[in-house]
Image: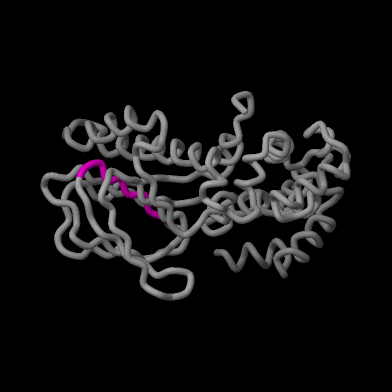
Amino acid sequence: MASIDRLSPLLDRFRVRTRVFHTGPLCGVTTFAAQPGRGFLHVLRRGEMEVTHLGADGRLERRAIDRPSLLFYPRPLEHAFHNAPTEDSDFACATLDFDGGATHPLVRTLPAVIVLPLAAVDGLEPSLDLLFAEIDNVRCGRRVLADRLFEVVLVHLFRWLLDHTDELALPAGLLTGLADERLARTLVAVHEAPGGPWTLVTMAQEAHMSRSAFAARFKSAVGQSPAEYVTGWRLTVAQERLRGGASVARTATELGYTNPPAFSRAFARELGQSPRAWLAGTR
C-alpha cells in the first residue's frame, strides 16, 4: 500500500503535539496522572522497570519491561513506574496532546496501552539516535527539536500499528479499515475531502468494488455503514472547525450540507444539541 498515505490526512487535520517533560533516571515510584485529552509516550532505550495501571475491569495490572521498549498511552490513564530507570538507563517521556481529545479519530480506535519493543519498529533507531543526542546535549533549540523528534517517533509508531492490526487484535474501527487496501483508498479520499459527494456508489467506485461487496466489507472492517462513517467524520471535522472559530454557515458549506439548517439537524441528531449550544458548552 506504498502509494496511499493513510496517516497524513488524519494528522494534518487532527494534530498531535508532543512535549518532552522528563529525561534520565527516576527515583522510587513515579505516577503519571490522567488528564483530559492527554496521552503519554515513554521511550526506554536502555534499562528495565515495572509499570502498573488499572485495566478495563478495574483491577491493577502489572507489567515488567525488561527490554528497550515504547510505552504508549493514547488516552488519559493514570500509570506508575516502579524500580524506575537508573543512571545507567536511556529514558525519556513526552506528553501527547491530541486535537479534539477523546474525539481524535486515532485515539478512539486504539487500546488503552501499547507496549512495543523498539526492535519491532523498522526505521526507528535513527530517529532515536537523533532524539537522545538532543536530550544529552544542551544547545540552542534543544527542547523544541526534542519535541519534534518525539513526533517523529510517534509517526513511526502509528505506521507500525497500521501494519500490525491483526497482531493487536483490534476491534472493528478506523485502523482496521485503513489496514484493508481497498477500503483504505475510500477512507483516505473521504478524509481528504469530507465535503465531497459521498454516496455508497461513489465510495464503492473509489475502492473499485461493487456496492454490495463494498458495503459488507466496510461494515465488517470499520464497524459502521459507509453512510454512518461519512456522517461521523464530517461532524468530527465540524467540531474542530467550530472550535477553531469557523461559522456554522461556512462549516455547513465546506462539509457538503445543502444549507446550515440541514447541518444543524445532522449535528443535533448525533451530538444531542445544536452546533452553537455545543460550542458554548465546550468553552
Q: Nearer the viewer, residue 36 or 71?
A: 71
* 112 sits to left or right of 237: left
Q: Nearer the viewer, residue 104 or 153?
A: 153
Q: Quadrant of the N terminus?
A: top right
Seen at 35% across and 43% down, the residue is 117
Seen at 44% across and 52% down, the residue is 97
Q: Quadrant of the C terminus?
A: bottom right
Verify whether residue 45 appears in magenta.
Answer: yes
Quadrant of res 63: bottom left
- Tell me if residue 1 comes above or below residue 71 in the rendering: above
Verify whether residue 26 appears in magenta.
Answer: no
Seen at 57% across and 56% down, the residue is 108
Q: Nearer the viewer, residue 127 or 264?
A: 127
Q: Nearer the viewer, residue 119 or 186?
A: 119
In the picture as drawn, the residue positioned furthest to the bottom comes out as 58
* Image location (x, y in percent) of residue 235: 70, 54
Q: Main secondary structure of the magenta part?
A: strand
* 65 sits to left or right of 213: left
In this figure, what is the number of numbered marks?
A: 0
Q: Which residues are magenta?
A: 39-46
* 168 sits to left or right of 263: left
Quadrant of res 144: top left
* 187 sits to left or right of 130: right
In the picture as drawn, the residue positioned furthest to the left comes out as 87
* Image location (x, y in percent) of residue 90: 20, 42
Seen at 35% across and 46% down, the residue is 70
